[in-house]
Amino acid sequence: MRTPVSTDPRTTEPRERSPRAFRPTMVLLLFLSASAGILLDASSGHAAEFADYLAAVDQALVKNPNAVPKHALYSCQDRRAFAVRLERRGEDVRAIRSLRFCFNLLGISTAAVDRASAPVDSSARQAAQLEKGREDARREYERALQLEPDPARGLEIYRSCAACHTPEGWGMASGVVPQLAGQHRSVVIKQLADIRAGNRQNRVMLPYASVESIGGAQAIADVAAYIDTLEISVENGHGDGQALALGERLYGEHCARCHGARGEGDAAKQIPRIQSQHYGYLLTQFELIRDGKRLNANPEMTAQIAGFEERETKAVLDWVSRLEPPEELRAPAGWRNPDFASP
Ligand code: HEC
Ligand code: HEC
């Protein structure tokens, strides 16, 4: 088993408690209350706009950039909860107005969000933006991959990720948050670079993974190196187990040549490990990729799965979720991440 990164001599001095911190549990609560509404609806106009305002508010709640007093943070949280309820009821205009109040409370400006959510005026401009996103992502990926990573610094960054991805990197069995443990470093770096450059949409996570909150390519290299030390949980979410023979056959015919015989992926080609990934997450991503809604999808995979029916999709992903990594990559039963143990 690995040694905890926090015993690295560089990090053994007591960590200062950041006065800005308003941290993990809150991030998770905020996230859980927001996710149901937003994750599934990033594409429609108003919902996307609301999501942008919400993401900006969440980031300010976590970082408290103007060091406003606690009671202002709590008032904003109430406003935020109210706004999310309004949005769910379809009252978008009121929801956004309610969130705007938070911007006042926290002393932040809506200008950046207003700009970002301005309608795209032509498809040519949209295409140019997409191309730029791909290019930015590719450049950041290549830079991060070459940098010398510092896993101890990566742990410090990962503390903010753990609120959603859990200290062990196991995500949530429901599949709303993916398991990151065991994911290839090259894949983690690519996905982060893609998300930051807008080449994969993830509005919920973006504020926590942005350059402003964690730093540039070095931060990606560091946090990916830390994630690389985490071991895989095989107690992940599965499907209903009704059609595993079909799933196995489809996997062999349509997936194994890229994702490997046991779903182990391929670090050199940035093909994700998908074995022991939560079924719910696999399903969400598979459908986004099939329907052309995940911008960074592999076009060859999209073509390969174009004809999949619902029954086949569920069967193959159920099979994938039950594929297990070799013993040495698995976390021992009952393991908890010692880097997160309270002193
Ligand atoms: C607010 C919750 C939240 C926080 C905080 C968060 N994430 Fe995520 N992350 C998610 C969700 C939800 C997804 C899946 C979203 C989707 O459907 O694309 C995700 C996806 C990812 C993926 C893609 C995984 C894959 O298999 O392709 C990576 C990599 C990742 N997160 C890394 C991080 C890192 C590193 C941090 C901290 C800097 C972080 N996340 C912070 C919620 C979060
Ligand atoms: C031609 C190669 C190829 C084939 C065939 C293929 N995939 Fe993929 N798949 C990829 C690549 C590459 C990615 C990552 C793309 C990116 O985001 O960079 C991916 C991503 C995924 C993801 C998202 C993983 C994550 O962590 O976000 C899932 C789920 C997935 N594939 C499942 C499957 C299944 C199931 C099959 C068979 C039915 C399949 N793929 C066939 C290459 C392939």
Image: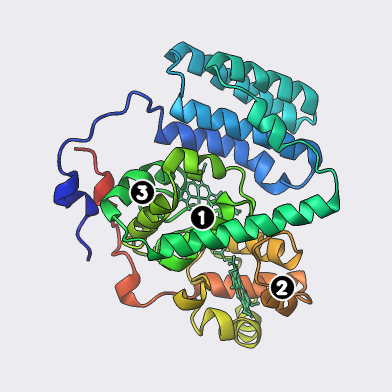
Identify residue for label 3: 167
Say which mark, if any, is on residue 302: 2
What secondary structure is found at the residue carrying circle 3?
Answer: loop
- Residue 141 left/right relative to 130: left
Report x, y in % for residue 78.
58, 19
Between disc 2 and disc 3, the foreground one is 2
- Inspect the image, locate mark 3, and give the three-letter code of the amino acid beneath it: Pro
- Residue 95 left/right relative to 150: right
What secondary structure is found at the residue carrying circle 1?
Answer: helix
Front one among 311 and 128: 128
Disc 1 from disc 2: Cα separation: 21 Å
Disc 1 from disc 3: Cα separation: 18 Å
The quadrant the C terminus occupies is top left
What secondary structure is found at the residue carrying circle 2?
Answer: helix
- Inspect the image, locate mark 2, and give the three-letter code of the amino acid beneath it: Thr
Front one among 266 and 198: 198
Identify residue for label 1: 192
- Inspect the image, locate mark 1, and give the three-letter code of the amino acid beneath it: Leu
Quadrant assignment for ligand 2: bottom right
Q: Earlier in the sequence, mark 1 or mark 2?
A: 1
The quadrant the N terminus occupies is bottom left
Q: In the image, what residue occupies the spot 32% across and 58% down?
A: 149
Q: In the image, what residue occupies the spot 47% across and 12% down?
A: 71
Say which mark, if any, is on residue 68: none
Between disc 1 and disc 2, the foreground one is 1
Between disc 1 and disc 3, the foreground one is 1
